[in-house]
Amino acid sequence: MRLLSTLLLTAVAAPALAATPEEVTTHYADLALAGYQDSLTTAQALQRAVAALIATPSDETLAAAKTAWLAARVPYQQTEAFRFGNPIVDDWEGRVNAWPLDEGLIDYVSAGYGNEENQLATLNVVATPTFTLSGNEIDATAITPALIAETLHEADGIEANVASGYHAIEFLLWGQDLNGTEPGAGARPFTDFATGDACTGGNCDRRAAYLQAATDLLVADLTEMVDNWDTDGPARAAVTTDPQAGLLAMLTGMGSLSYGELAGERTKLGLMLNDPEEEHDCFSDNTHNSHFYDGLGIRNVYLGSYTRTDGSVLAGPSLADLVAAAEPGVHTQLKAELDASVAALQALKDAGDSGRTFDTLIAPGNAEGEALIMAAVNALVTQTASIDRAVTALGLSKVDFEGSDSLDSPEAVFQ
């Protein structure tokens, strides 16, 4: 009896086996699938809200559509950590989240707006049913998802000609933010979608058609990405067939989003230029939330945990398990640094939620804003070095994370 008790005690006290690369990459694919499923579900809610706005334009239906757009950003931004290490995602991402955009391509803009390097920056498709593009006459009488995706998006090969995705929809719901670095977001009136004499801005029927088509296209694009991560999907296969390559994809996505994209292009660059055109969700002044959920998504991938929009938590074998088994010190440091970056981004979020939005924080001479922003930038840069150490700890091949002139060659920003 004493021997049995000893054996039982030994079994209980034995350390759990570390997760395997196969288990970690499979769970990573599950996390991606869940994130894109939530992104699709919230985009479908946005689709319904847009339909209601078009059917019955009012302050209330416009506000409901804006609320649905903001809700849709929460799960989607957390999926951005799946971008850079996964070509299937990175090649697709420009269709749904490209920015900044020359919004005059889509609809009316303020007098004097333009871009001398982009002749289409003031095309205003909403007001222009036929136009010439690359020498071809384009019939845009019917504004459809196909017209947006196949003809308008990145027209003439110019990246600023963003015609689809979250930010095109954002512009159509909010309109231009003409407040510079002063408080205030876009203020498009609901009457821009009204019919008959109540219509403001002109071409309300075409504006509504564009909004509906862009929203339908977003739903279709997200459906495609859900399928890519589902059972037998190519994105899932790419990270699970070769688990070592899958682990490298995970860390590449974390490091590139952390460093070049979020710390650099989306955060420090706007501060250096004091330019609200460089803020990610510039029409809605939602940038503080987008940045926070980007940072949360990076930590999600490392910890193998994601809180779904219904409040349930998906957790499982993680990179953290593997790194902790290989190099406990690296894991402890990286985990602490991820927590610190999320806390710094939470401070930015809290500021934005209280009215001190990103565009006001980057105003010249705003010392408090600069301190808040640079705390987030520095935390993201710091954790990237530990993400690189995690690559080494797991014996993976060296990876070059995405960079940014704002971090690597600040002088080039002003050239």
Image: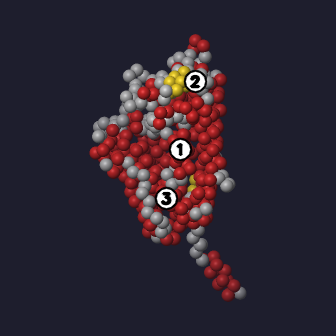
**Closer to us: 133 or 259:** 133
From the top left corner, tell me how far across and down residue 396 is, in percent: 48, 66
Please state which of the two labelled residues, at mark 3 or mark 1, is closer to the viewer: 1
Residue identifier under label 3: 251
For mark 3, give the secondary structure: helix
Amino acid type, mark 2: Asp
Residue identifier under label 1: 93
**Closer to us: 107 or 300:** 107
Identify the residue at horizontal 63%, vertical 39% (top origin): 220
Visible residue check, residue 174: no
Return the disc, 2 or 3, that comes first in the chain's sequence. 2
Q: Are marks 2 and 1 in contact (CB under 8 Å)?
A: no
Visible residue check, residue 323: yes
Outermost residue, front direction? 135
Q: Do the residues labelled 2 and 3 touch (CB within 8 Å)?
A: no
Residue identifier under label 2: 139
Report how far apart the C-alphas of labels 2 and 3 lie in the structure: 45 Å
Return the disc, 2 or 1, that comes first in the chain's sequence. 1
For mark 1, give the secondary structure: helix
From the top left corner, tell me how far across and down residue 156 is, in percent: 47, 33
Q: Give the numbered dot on residue 31.
A: none
Question: Does residue 126 appear to the left or right of 120 in the view shown?
Answer: right
Return the disc, 3 or 1, that comes first in the chain's sequence. 1
Report how far apart the C-alphas of labels 3 and 1 lie in the structure: 18 Å
From the top left corner, tell me how far across and down residue 240 is, in percent: 60, 61
